[in-house]
Amino acid sequence: MTELKACKVCDVGRQNCYGIAVTSLVQLKFKGAEALGISASASVSVVLEDDGTIIEDEDYFQCLPANTKFMLLNYKETWTPALQGTGHPNRDDVEVDGHDDVDGAESWHSVAELLRQNLANIILMSEADLQSLIGVPCSELAAALGFSQQKTRVLQDTLQTVVDRREEERQSKEILQLYLKATEQEGSRNPQDECAKLDETDGVQVEATAGFSSKTLMVLKDKTHPETRLSNEELQMVVKQGLEVMEKVLGWDKEKTAVLVQACEAEISKRLRQVQALQSLHSQSRSTNISSQPQTERETRAKRSKKTV
């Protein structure tokens, strides 16, 4: 009989957490869903709570230590890091009745709420989200965030800087690609064949069951370096769907699709490293302030004793 392993399971909001004992990954999904009140018929995926690693392999699951904390995700739910001082935002509620509300007049309020919870969420946002906040009148955004107008103007300037840096990154990649193409041997590819392939993909019917919004698909198919334009949730969806599904969704060949999926994985890792770096700096700053307080008190006492003498 397989030995029982103690595990912890939580939901996407990290509000509910339970301890369970299971023998396999399948049993973890079943008992975890039951503990969290998830329907037995729902499609559930398992990730590590601390870094979002997707757990699909039974052997890998068995190698993990006891009391590992897992997060169970329903369809359309995506892992986000546990940022300090946040309520672990999930932006699935932005989509209403199957239609993406990002272009709506009031859609920026949900994005502003993420920033109000923690400014580090800037790193995890899509380019469209950042642009939506840049275009909001300063007074309205200040009221939504609870900031002064001066602080809000600085914030909007920062958002514009993030957008500009992503554009610079895309341009650098494009220049590198042009250089690599220029160094290839002439005749290795036929430009007419390449154009024909692009024309063929333009008419591909996208599978609605993949779960992507029309806006996300437009970015993936029509924009250069789409990984720099998407939010973490959208990037994780691409990675989660995998190579075979994305080939069908985009109508691309395997090689081109693999490049996209790998680029999305790399972008996720880069953004999470940036968030972790911010958290580390924040922690160091707090510890430095705390450690400096006793020294300041000692210096004050020393000055007072000198005056007394």
Image (tube, rainbow, N blue to C red):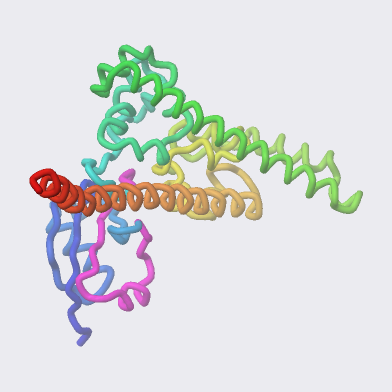
State the residue in front, 33 or 205: 33
State the residue in front, 154 or 111: 154
Task: Note whether 125 is above or below 99 in the view shown.
Answer: below
Q: Which image quadrant is residue 134 in?
A: top left
Q: Which image quadrant is residue 159 in?
A: top left
Q: Quadrant of the N terminus?
A: bottom left
User: In x, y percent, where is residue 176?
Assistant: 73, 45
- 91 within the magenta span: no
Residue 74 in view: no
Residue displayed at 91% across by 50% down: 187
Residue displayed at 84% across by 46% down: 182
User: In x, y percent, where is residue 57?
Assistant: 38, 70
From this viewpoint, which residue is outermost toward the right? 186
User: In x, y percent, where is residue 284?
Assistant: 31, 52
User: In x, y percent, where is residue 47?
Assistant: 32, 59
Side of 291 where 253 appears, left or right:
right
